[in-house]
Image: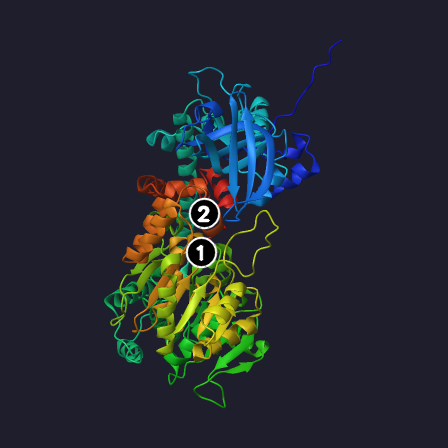
Amino acid sequence: MAVKKTTEAILPTTPLADVFRLTEPQKKGLAKIGIVTAYDLLYYFPTRYTSTAEIKHIANLIKGEDATIYGRVVSSKTSKGFKSKIPMTEAVIEDSTGHIKCVWFHQAYISKMLIEGSMVKLSGHVEERSGSPYLANPDLARTKELPIGSTDSLFQSEDETIFYPVYPETRGITSRFIYHHIQKLFSKGILENIVDAIPADILARYHLPTLTTSLVWIHTPQKEADALSARKRFAFEEVFMIQLARQQERALTKEHSGFKIVPEKNALADFTARFPFKPTASQEHALKDIFADFKKGIPMGRLLEGDVGSGKTFVAATAAYATVTTAPLDNKFGNLQVAYMAPTEILAEQHFKSFIEYFKDTNIEIGLLTGSGAKKFPSKSDPNGATSISRAQLLKWVAEGNLPILIGTHALIQKSVQFKNLGLAIVDEQHRFGTAQRSKLAKKDEVLPHFLSMTATPIPRTLALTIYGNLDLTLLDEMPAGRLPIKTELVTKTNRSRMEEHIRAEINNGRQAYVICPRIDEPDPTKEAALNAKSVIAEADRIATDVFPEFNVGILHGKMKPDEKEWVMEEFKKGAINILVATSVIEVGVNVPNATIIVIEGAERFGLSQLHQLRGRVIRSNHQAYCYVLTDSTNEVSQKRLKALTTAKNGFELSELDLTLRGAGELSGRKQWGISDLGMEAIKNIKMVEAARTEAARLIAEDTSLSNYPLLLDTILKNHRDTHWE
């Protein structure tokens, strides 16, 4: 008698371990890439697709083409070039139609991956030597089987093209594993238990497929158009959900009261007159926007975006002055307070010193709070200087409302920090902080403080529209009078000596220089994943010994202790260090006006926006500044990006270009902005972003709490409430 098997329904929330028999390495691998439930697996999308039309037989390879082959390893060995002595791996690969030689230069370790008899997939450029084709430096992937859906001959039929997805892999989890387990979920009926969160009228309006259709099409497309439609839907979905979260937060914020701040015109004019320069039209416009918000009685939410050196700190200081000279709502005691949060101790200390210069002789006290300790200005012994005080005493003054301005790092959002009347929260370089961290500053009372975010990171308009749906945007697009445009030059091996002579002349003329390297230490050459990139420590030694032995060379990187970093920066500011070799730790905010040269090694390893920010370190005075961009990369896209750095007028122009040139997987979405690579693809499409923004604003206007859309509310609460804002 046959026993009828019963199976429980598989829901999106069902843990994968309850659905499949998983080994411990597989469980660890899945957890590493964020896959725990059936939903996580379904939303683990392919980065690309390969079709059988792209796969070549070895016998059909043609010189000059880019090709993908599957074959077996016949032999492999390591050797050295006869004349060049370059270490290399040589291998012979065969399929049913023939065999081909493959060569990897400077990659002797690859021979360990080429086990005789094993199956491999190779993608690369077909070269020719002595009439015989070979693959030069092909991408290598070991595989146990032929492509998904392929027969031993690689083709089901001559005119039938089969698409199969390629997923990001990790130790213990292959692309094939992901594919087959998704297919098993489909066969177990999971799609019957999935409900689409996006309202049907929105899908119809923009001709987007339903969720179940999209999941099938993105994982098993029958044709290229299927995959494109599915990716369009999921890209729209991600941007739409982020917009919903931002628009809802904006609406909820406006339900609170904010402090009314109306600065006294004469006092404000006296304060701005203290600065040694006349404000630019952009700075005056920014202050006009801020003061207009201050008068409304609802909490301001504004992003101030401007290139390095455009004067954001002046705007912040003036807004701070207007705030701390205003009485709180009850007028019972003291004035409003300002919290100014910076991403690093170096930058917090720098802002503290700047504010001392701006506020001395105003009788306005300023505090500094970092992980290293607490300081207060002015000190009793020195009216023009600061003194170290106990953390407990500083916090007491803040809580009592006796300290108007507090500058610091993440230390400002600890539970022990309590403001009496926080009127304005300023966050510098907000991409270093998540929403939850900012909220700890801003949501300690029913009367919310005004919020000013500042960034020098050039952000494409579509990205700003998406991630800053809850903030108003003000651009500082002018540089202070007298600033000379920086001269940027792409340096190759042939003109390196000319660059070094120019640096020597500039330093002998009293200037200083930065040298930026991608790494801190030299890579271990025995490691397969070793990056062939210059390191701070080795480059500093080379510069001090072989290139500029007559100058003092210092180093700065993220592994140094805070007091070590502070000492190095002080020595550099004083001029005791002529050349500072550093990682991109100096990217944010470090201000040394006498440093007029920056050399960026391995520039192809940085994004254009980051390169622009690094370059901004030397636009701090009216001296002519120089940026030398060094790369050994011959990649066409890398060359285009770096050449753009030498010609673009500003950071905003660069950010748009970077978005266009960089492909999926290169946009640093999840890491930097809290957006997936698929979402970042959508950011390139202004119509899609504006459509998502329009629909989100409409739904929130109709129903701020989203009580009529519980699935949407659940999604944004789970996935988009605490994403990074930059």
Instruction: Give how far across and how far down residue 235 sits, in percent.
Output: 41, 38
Q: Residue 620, how many percent across, how many down?
A: 35, 71
Looking at the rendered structure, the kind of residue marked 2 is Gly
Residue behind mark 2: 669
Q: Residue, x 53% and y 49% (percent of image)? A: 85
**Which amino acid lies under the numbered mark 1 shown in the image of this protein?**
Gly
Relative depth, front residue between 50 and 694: 50
Q: Can residue 420 be seen by looking at this rendering? A: no
Of the numbered discs 2 and 1, the one sitting upstream in the chain is 1
Residue at the image point whose x is 57% and y is 30% from the top: 176
- For label 1, the SS is loop
* The N terminus, quarter of image: top right
Q: Nearer the viewer, mark 2 or mark 1?
A: 1
Q: Residue at x 48, y 47 (%)?
A: 670
- 246 lies above or below 568: above
Query: Circle 1 sits on which residue?
Result: 602
Question: Which element is circle 2 on?
Answer: helix
The residue closer to the viewer here, 113 or 671, is: 113
